[in-house]
Amino acid sequence: MSAGLVEHDNTHNAAVHRATAQRLSRAYERREATDPVIDGHPHLGVDDAYAIQKQQVAGWIESGDEIVGYKVGLTSRAMQIQTGVDQPDYGHLMRSMFELGHFPIPSTRFIQPRIEPEIAFILARPLSGPGVTMADAVRAIDCLLPAIEIIDSRIRDWQLTIVDTIADNASSGGVVLGGHPVSPRSIDPRLAGCVLHLNGEVVATGAGGAVLGSPLNSLVWLANALGSLGVTLEAGHVILSGAMTRAQSVRPGDTVSAHLAGLGSVGAVFATDTQEAA
């Protein structure tokens, strides 16, 4: 391929990245679903998707938001097979995404929310790859917390490919953290069982071992993936390691709770339509 064609392709892709990032950002702001990214641009790949994600994050930072952590997605083999990939993906956690447990969460913040119970790592020191080992990751952790991730998709009807979900910040929506920190030396996260309740009924069960064999593997993978891009996980960052059960859809008025063995419980309440109108 000639230099002129390469330059044309790069310019075209940059324009597609900008336009797609703007479209997804508008979907965030208006709480309106949009068509899949891949529909109009079937040539886009994973690198393009992360470039689109990065542009949206830059816009949120310019608007006054702040990166306070990351989430790891596609941590189950079944989901990787479904999306045609052989590794997880990641998204950014912004300060504006965090909600308090048991305080009504405005459902109007989301388009088509689902919830997933996860183990969250809070870092005590920076962690930077490549070359991060399991031992490095354990030493970097301050504590573990039970968490509920509220995933949401700006892509209509969750019709996702790997490009769509990465471009859409790995379907990030919100985060609720439990209030009882646990030392990383007092629990084996692989063996932590999870029971998820929706409106008082058990709807799913799982265990930490469903997350890449161990949630710690998520942290190692993330540190190395970001490190190859020159990005360091910082002290104080919240890292969501991946879903321990299948995601469950939620509606206004729903109450969610997750109990993680050895970590305690975390709950979330979604405001009713009446509460939001008040």
Image (tube, grey):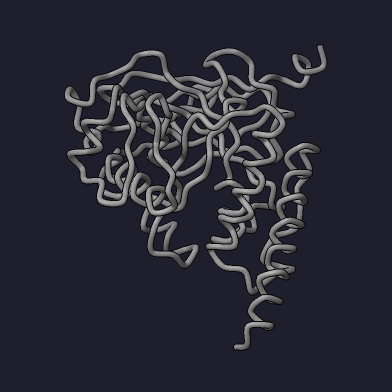
- The picture quadrant where one finds residue 121 is top left
The mark tally for this picture is 0
Q: Residue at x 39, y 50 (%)?
A: 75
Place of residue 66 in the rendered image (x, y in percent of width and height, measured from the top left): 58, 29
Looking at the image, the residue that sits furthest to the front is: 3
Q: Image height check: is 230 above or below 190?
A: below
In the image: residue 126, left or right of residue 19: left
In the image: residue 16, left or right of residue 226: right
Q: Quick check: can you spot residue 161?
A: no
- The picture quadrant where one finds residue 240 is top left
Place of residue 213 in the rendered image (x, y in percent of width and height, measured from the top left): 26, 48
- The picture quadrant where one finds residue 245 is top left
Q: Name the quarter where the C terminus is drawn.
A: top right
- Between residues 3 and 187, which one lies in front from this camera angle? 3
Q: Quick check: can you spot residue 33?
A: yes
- Between residues 201 and 263, which one lies in front from this camera angle? 263
Q: Residue at x 32, y 37 (%)?
A: 127
Q: Image height check: is 80 above or below 22?
A: below
- Between residues 34 and 205, which one lies in front from this camera angle? 34
Q: Residue at x 58, y 61 (%)?
A: 163
Q: Image height check: is 146 above or below 101?
A: below
In the image: residue 210, left or right of residue 98: left
Looking at the image, the residue that sits furthest to the bottom is: 1
Place of residue 218 in the rendered image (x, y in percent of width and height, measured from the top left): 33, 45
Q: Residue at x 78, y 16 (%)?
A: 274
Q: Name the quarter where the N terminus is drawn.
A: bottom right
Q: Image height check: is 62 above or below 274?
A: below
